[in-house]
């Protein structure tokens, strides 16, 4: 068994898994030799065989992966995966890295040998990633039965003890297995955690109630950031309502339906609490050229954005070239452009209600 395990390390990549009661191998994760995850170890153990490490990781609620130190037989249990922290996945010929089984429903397969007092877990592996048939089966080390019978795969952000940096970190870690739901994330540095609703890389900022903005008399929409950090971009998801800039034209969610003057431009602008345009950035905003009823031109307050239109269900802004740093509870505003710049707003009407999503770096 040992020889084969070492051989698999030499081959640099192999699969490791658990055997169910019917003797079938549930191949789980690749081990990757010569690379390890740096700086995310929460426990270190001296073990006999590398497989013990697998067992140890299995027993820890928050273990996501482990590094094994060759020669010293040290087992380093990690709180993260290489997908969550690619920048910390670095070469070291003395170590190899294994991600914990992350297949959903592994609770069942891990439970197979039952909570009997002599329960043992078994591991198996294969040298070719897709070759389930030829997987070798081996008895592994004894895992404490109470743990084994409660094995549940804890992924990043699903318990308070294992908060993620952001929704996008979870998205990176979970890939297409990510589900839209609440996750634990840090909200301010590493001191506070919150339950944030994540949809892929996006974190929803408002709660059940939507944020709404009107079109005149400084009736902007306001929301407070629930997490400090660097904002890569935001999006607004339409929930109800519409706005119009002229009684004779139809409504829209985000802009002007005055084709003559504004050519169906968008004018929903997110600013900081000092009314500075954040999304889109000021340099992306257009104004009216001098002429007609605007002899001096009109201030910059509208824009067009590929992929978004007056009634698109979502207004998705571009990624900021320089992410915008926000503090916890910082207030942000959503403006209708004419209200923001106090120009031609008298005939405006309506309100748009939205959910606010932020993509943190
Ligand atoms: C944002 O937070 C401030 C200070 O806590 C509060 O006064 C304000 O009402 C909040 N705004 C919103 C939109 O929740
Ligand atoms: C923003 O960046 C992400 C990757 O970091 C990319 O997937 C997305 O398409 C970008 N969005 C836009 C609007 O370019």
Image (cartoon, rainbow, N blue to C red):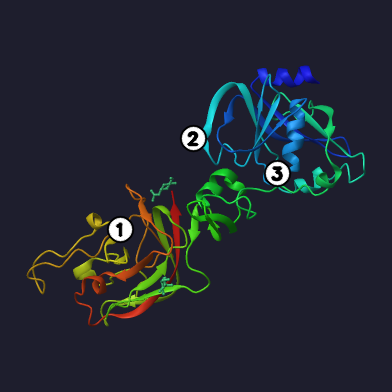
Image position of 90 with respect to 350: above or below: above
Could you say which quadrant of the image residue 110 lies in?
A: top right
- Which residue bears the numbered disc 1? 280
Q: How far apart are marks 3 and 1 (CA)?
A: 40 Å
Query: Would you say the beta carbon of the disc 1 residue lies within 8 angstroms of ligand 2?
Result: no
Residue that protrudes farthest toward the right in the picture: 117
Disc 2 element: helix
Q: Are marks 2 and 3 in contact (CB under 8 Å)?
A: no
Which-is-in-front pick, marks 2 and 3?
A: 2
The CA distance from mark 1 to mark 2 is: 30 Å
Residue 237's spot in the image, x, y percent?
A: 45, 65
Numbered circles on residues, count: 3
Task: Please report whichever mark, 2 or 3, sits nearer to the chain's N-terminal start.
Answer: 2
Left or right of residue 4, residue 206 in this image:
left
Query: Which quarter of the frame holds ligand 1?
Result: bottom left
Check the picture and name the quadrant holding the N terminus.
Answer: top right
- The image position of residue 254, as x and y in percent, is 34, 68
Residue bearing the label numbered 2: 87
Tell me the element at label 1.
Answer: loop
Q: Is ligand 2 closer than 8 angstroms to the Cβ of mark 3?
A: no
Residue situated in front as seen by the camera: 240 or 261: 240
State left or right for residue 95 relative to residue 101: left
Point 84% across, 47% down: residue: 146
Is 185 located above or below residue 27 in the figure?
Answer: below
Residue at the location (62% across, 24% down)? 95
Q: Where is residue 346 in the image (x, y as percent from the top left)?
A: 22, 82
Disc 3: which residue? 103
Sort mark 3 into few (<14), some (14-19) or many (20+) by Cα contacts within 10 Å.
some
Mark nearer the N terminus (1 vs 2): 2
């Amino acid at each position: 068994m040992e020889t084969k395990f070492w051989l698999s390390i030499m081959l640099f990549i192999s699969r490791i898994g658990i055997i169910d009661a019917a003797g079938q191998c549930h191949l789980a994760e690749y081990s990757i030799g010569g690379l390890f995850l740096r700086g995310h170890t929460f426990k270190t153990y001296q073990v006999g065989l590398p497989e013990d490490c697998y067992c140890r990781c299995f027993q820890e609620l928050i273990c996501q992966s482990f590094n094994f130190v060759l020669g010293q037989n040290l087992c380093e249990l990690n709180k993260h995966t290489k997908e969550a922290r690619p920048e910390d996945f670095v070469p070291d010929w003395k170590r190899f890295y294994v991600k914990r089984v992350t297949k959903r429903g592994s609770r069942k397969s891990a439970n197979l040998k039952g909570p009997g007092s002599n329960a043992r877990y078994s591991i198996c592996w294969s040298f070719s990633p897709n070759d389930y048939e030829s997987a070798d089966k081996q008895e592994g080390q004894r895992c404490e039965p109470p743990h084994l019978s409660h094995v549940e795969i804890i992924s990043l952000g699903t318990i308070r003890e294992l908060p993620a940096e952001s929704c996008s970190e979870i998205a990176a870690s979970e890939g297409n297995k990510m589900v839209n739901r609440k996750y634990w994330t840090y909200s301010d540095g590493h001191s506070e955690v919150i339950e944030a609703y994540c949809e892929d890389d996006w974190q929803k900022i408002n709660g059940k109630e939507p944020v709404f903005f009107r079109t005149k008399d400084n009736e902007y929409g306001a929301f407070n950031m629930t997490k400090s950090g660097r904002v890569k971009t935001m999006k607004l998801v339409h929930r109800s309502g519409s706005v119009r800039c002229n009684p004779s034209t139809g409504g829209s969610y985000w802009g002007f339906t005055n084709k003559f003057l504004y050519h169906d431009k968008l004018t929903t602008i997110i600013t900081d609490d000092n009314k500075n345009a954040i999304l889109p950035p000021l340099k992306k905003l257009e104004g009216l050229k001098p002429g007609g009823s605007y002899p001096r031109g009109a201030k910059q307050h509208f824009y067009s954005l590929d992929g978004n239109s007056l009634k698109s269900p979502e207004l998705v802004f571009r990624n900021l070239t320089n992410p915008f740093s926000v503090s916890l509870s910082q207030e942000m505003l959503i403006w209708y452009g004419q209200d923001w710049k106090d120009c031609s707003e008298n005939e405006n009407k309506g309100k748009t209600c939205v959910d606010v999503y932020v993509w943190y770096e």
